[in-house]
Image (cartoon, rainbow, N blue to C red):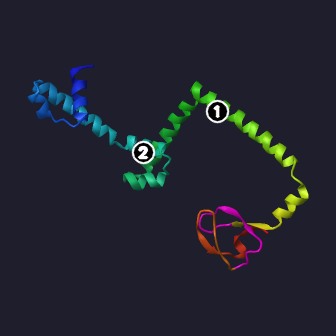
């Protein structure tokens, strides 16, 4: 490791240039290392890093715009670049292997589901289903099952906790 790199490590640990000069390092070397350290720190705060970091965290584009204060068009361009890089990552051998393993697991689960559904008495199943209706939340548009015994006008909550009065237009499947 070079002297510059070791000085940069010292800055990362919280030391300042004056401390390092007192320890016997050349002033010009210390300040060159400090300049590089500051440039690295600044680079960490650049829009690309900010946006990519948030995308990796799973945040939405509008949320990223709000948090960073960046122009939506710039965030959109960075998102497209991020997707492009992710596509390259997907084509790596380790990722392709993981995709194949996931496909195998899905196939096994599908077979198990098929086996289980074969054993279900269709009359009983239809009878159970007939006691429910499918409702769509007007706030988040999530669809969920609701017992038929719940009357129109009743105050209900979707699975995400949004409350609303049940109306005919909320019912998807009667």
129 is higher (above) or lower (below) than 151: above
Q: Quadrant of residue 52?
A: top left
User: What residue sits 15% from the left and 30% below the top?
Assistant: 31
Distance CA(mark 2)–CA(mark 1)? 26 Å
Question: Does residue 55 appear to the left or right of 115 in the view shown?
Answer: left
Foreground residue among 135 and 15: 15
Q: Position of residue 20 (x, y in %)?
A: 14, 30
- Secondary structure, mark 2, is helix
Mark 1, residue position:
99
Foreground residue among 81 and 124: 124
Mark 2, residue position:
51
The quadrant of the rendering that contains the C terminus is bottom right
User: Magenta stretch?
Assistant: 136-152
141 is higher (above) or lower (below) than 1: below
Q: Position of residue 164 (x, y in %)?
A: 62, 74
- Secondary structure, mark 1, is helix
The quadrant of the rendering that contains the N terminus is top left
């Amino acid at each position: 490791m070079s002297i510059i790199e070791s000085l940069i490590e010292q800055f990362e640990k919280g030391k300042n240039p004056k401390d390092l000069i007192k320890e016997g390092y050349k002033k010009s070397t210390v300040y060159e290392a400090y300049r590089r350290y500051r440039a690295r720190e600044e680079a960490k705060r650049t829009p690309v890093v900010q946006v990519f970091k948030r995308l990796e965290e799973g945040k939405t584009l509008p949320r990223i715009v709000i948090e960073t204060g960046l122009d939506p068009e710039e965030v959109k361009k960075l998102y497209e670049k991020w997707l492009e890089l992710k596509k390259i990552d997907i084509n790596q051998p380790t990722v392709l292997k993981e995709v194949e393993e996931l496909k195998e697991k899905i196939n096994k689960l599908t077979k198990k589901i098929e086996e289980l559904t074969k054993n279900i008495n269709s009359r009983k199943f239809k009878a159970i289903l007939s006691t429910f209706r499918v409702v769509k939340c007007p706030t988040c548009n999530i669809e969920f099952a609701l017992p038929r015994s719940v009357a129109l006008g009743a105050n209900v909550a979707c699975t995400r906790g949004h409350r609303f009065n049940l109306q005919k237009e909320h019912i998807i499947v009667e």
